Image: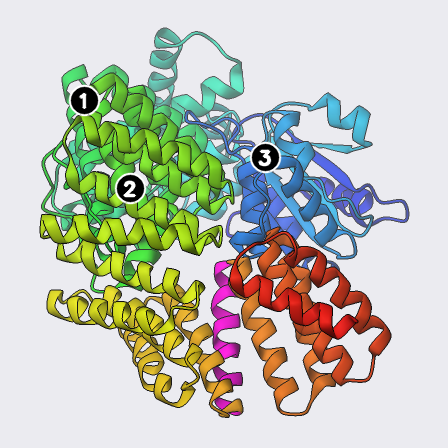
Amino acid sequence: MRGFINRRAEIDRLDRVLLGPEPAGLTVIVGTAGVGKTALALRWAHRAMDRFPDGQLYVNLRGYDPGAPVTAEQALDRFLRALAVPSGRIPEDVEGKAGLYRSLLAERRVLVVLDNAAHISQVRPLLPGGSASRTIVTSRDRLEGVMAHDGAQRVTVEILPEIEAVALIQTLTTDYRAGDEAADLAELARLCARLPLALRIAAERAASRPWMPLAELIRNLRDESRLWDELAASSGEEYDGVHAVFAWSYRSFAPEAARMFRLLGLHPTAEFGTNIAAEAAGVPVTTARHLLDSIVGAHMLEQTAADRYQFHDLLRAYATDAVHHEEPLERQYEALARILAWYLHTAYAACAVMHQWGRMLAPDALPAPATVPRFPDHDTAVQWCYLEWPNLFAAIKAAAKSGLDTVTWQLTLATEPAMRRVPIHDQRVVVNIALEAARRDGARQGEGDLLATLAEIERMRGRFDEAAARAEESLAIFGELDDRHGERIVLNFLGVNLLHRRRFGEAAERFESLLELQLAEGDVEGEAAALFNLAEAYDGIRRHREAVEAARRSVELGQALGNRHVELVALVFVARATANLGDAGAALADAARGVEIARELRDTRTEGWALLDYGRIQRLAGRHEDALVSYRRATTVYEDAGVLDRLAWSLDGTGTTFRDLGRPADAVPFHRQAVKIARETGSPWVLGSVLDNLAESLAAAGDDAEAVDVGREAADWLARLDDQEAAERLERIRRTLS
């Protein structure tokens, strides 16, 4: 790290307390703002990399940021993803996340760095449970609770001694200046309170003015210090010193750069991209890039990647303070509106690409900016949403806090397709914020759509009764508004909810009624969706020929509409029902075409779903090697996506294929993995089915005793269901056991 000066004593102490003969599991680095705690922690982590072969985890908890800090739950979610836990396997509650996190680190040697912690509540759930890992926490507070309760060691980082502060300035200016007097360097260091953050900014300004005597720069800074003393209540010499340096550097900016710097203080998080900076300042992107470069060059902003920037928390606080003092309230509102408008319309543009069927209300709360990007395909849209989700989440909360209720609920609805890929907790938080905003706004249609979104969230949580209740509330609002389209969307959801509960007969009746409504209203897309859902329901009650007919009609409608998602889903249902009629060979082409369309759309999750059916059909058609390829790809998709039931099916299908090849010993490990994952789903159908297949492979491998025990457990789970397929499986298991 260029300009990292000495800190030899602190480095040595970290070596002793973390790596010595009696190491501490937890060390807290404390010191005032801007003193270099993070730099010290990261420097030591880099030096000690080989001592932690299982990796390092880092999170900036933003405990002192002007915005909301990162909670322990949010940090745990990030850590679990970094540890390759699929999103579907991450528990919903903080206790469950902490337990899984500790179990994963129990036998690993990992360094955990928790940067900028303000409270014990941020830290304690993030402490690994094993003795092999080490944790470094940086904080401005002494965190006495963790010292007493968790046996932590403390490393205090003081301001730099004068000789080291002067050395830092010289290191950063040596290529640009020569002949500066030692007394002037010492005075500059004193005015910067000998804090590394302030010293770097001051050194950059000195380096950028090699022709200006250092004494003149010092006079300017001394004047700025007096001004700061007059404007601000004293918060300690170090605090005043660093703010005086900020002001000194800020006032040296060209007016356009200074304006951009302070307006970025209105952005809802510390990290942002070039386009949003352009919108905040109301300038072209090329101009914004130039202005950002000048701010980064002054060390008042950090560039983290191409077109990505972030504030130090002190600098963000300074920018926020500057914008509140220097910009009229009307100008602040206009800048915030531009920021929110960009997120609103960009989220809508991305999610419209991800959207599969139904409706998305075009946002009209704010005008669309000219810089809204285009998203050429599904995966590009997904990647943008994943990168920007923390900003979208914060923007929704900022809009609500600012009283922009229409923006709040419209932005939430615009992000609805993206929300399915973020933690359930975040989904519920933003939808409930938006629901309150829609109710304050008197936006009944928005309220109805948000209730429908909440119903989908509850269904994904496996809470089918709550999902149905929220859907019924939504249905009542759409009835009141005479919103027939909204009603039909919710009726479709209620039918899908029944499919997930394996109540196929009731679902078939609901979709038959819905199909009549769609036909009467001339809603062709809705008709196509009702048909492929009806096909799944018919297939579940063994009306396979009718399932094929319904799905074929859906394919034709999807093709006529140019809706390739509808087409691929319907093709898979055609293939499934055809195979269930006993003609797997004829089903292959439709299944293959469904997979092909998913790949052309770059919709990996739907591709994984289609591959599960394709693999099964290939196996039934005797193409076992091809089936293994399909199941392997599906497993990869669902390991990444964390969709547990489908991951269990892909592993189970691999095992069944190996058994069909006469290799039951190779099949058993895949079935065991499937069972382990199925237990996490809590689904009697998934768990009962994969246990049944494990029992068959165990018996084929000659392990009759375990096969009997596993078969009995499978029967216990399947006995909880009353659909026809479960009943047939149960009867077969009981015959085998008897």
* Residue at the image position 62 percent from the left and 66 percent from the top: 689
Q: What amino acid is at disc 2? A: Val
Q: What amino acid is at disc 3? A: Ala
Q: Is mark 3 on a helix, strand or loop?
A: helix
- Which one is nearer the viewer's eye here, 678 or 164? 678
187 left or right of 401 in image = right
Name the residue that disc number 2 marks. Answer: 490
Q: Quadrant of residue 709?
A: bottom right
Task: Examine the structure image and report whether residue 626 is included in the region drawn in magenta.
Answer: yes
- Are discs 1 and 3 less than 8 Å apart at CB? no
Task: Examine the structure image and report whether residue 732 is included in the region drawn in magenta.
Answer: no
Secondary structure, magenta segment, majority class: helix
- Which one is nearer the viewer's eye here, 737 or 355? 737
* Residue at the image position 52 percent from the left and 91 percent from the top: 625
Q: Position of residue 9 (x, y in %)?
A: 73, 40
Of labels 1 and 3, the one closer to you: 3
Residue 68 drawn above or below residue 538: above
Name the residue that disc number 1 marks. Answer: 333
Q: What element carries label 1?
A: helix
Residue 575 drawn above or below residue 709: below
Q: Position of residue 647 (x, y in %)?
A: 55, 65
654 left or right of 465 in image = right
Name the residue that disc number 3 marks. Answer: 72
Q: For the residues marked 1 and 3, what is the alpha-carbon distance in whole angstroms?
A: 32 Å
Of labels 2 and 1, the one closer to you: 2
Q: Where is residue 291 in the image (x, y as percent from the top left)?
A: 21, 43
Q: What element carries label 2?
A: helix
Label 2 environment density (alpha carbons within 10 Å; few <14, some 14–19, many ≥20): many
Q: Give the range drawn in magenta.
A: 625-642
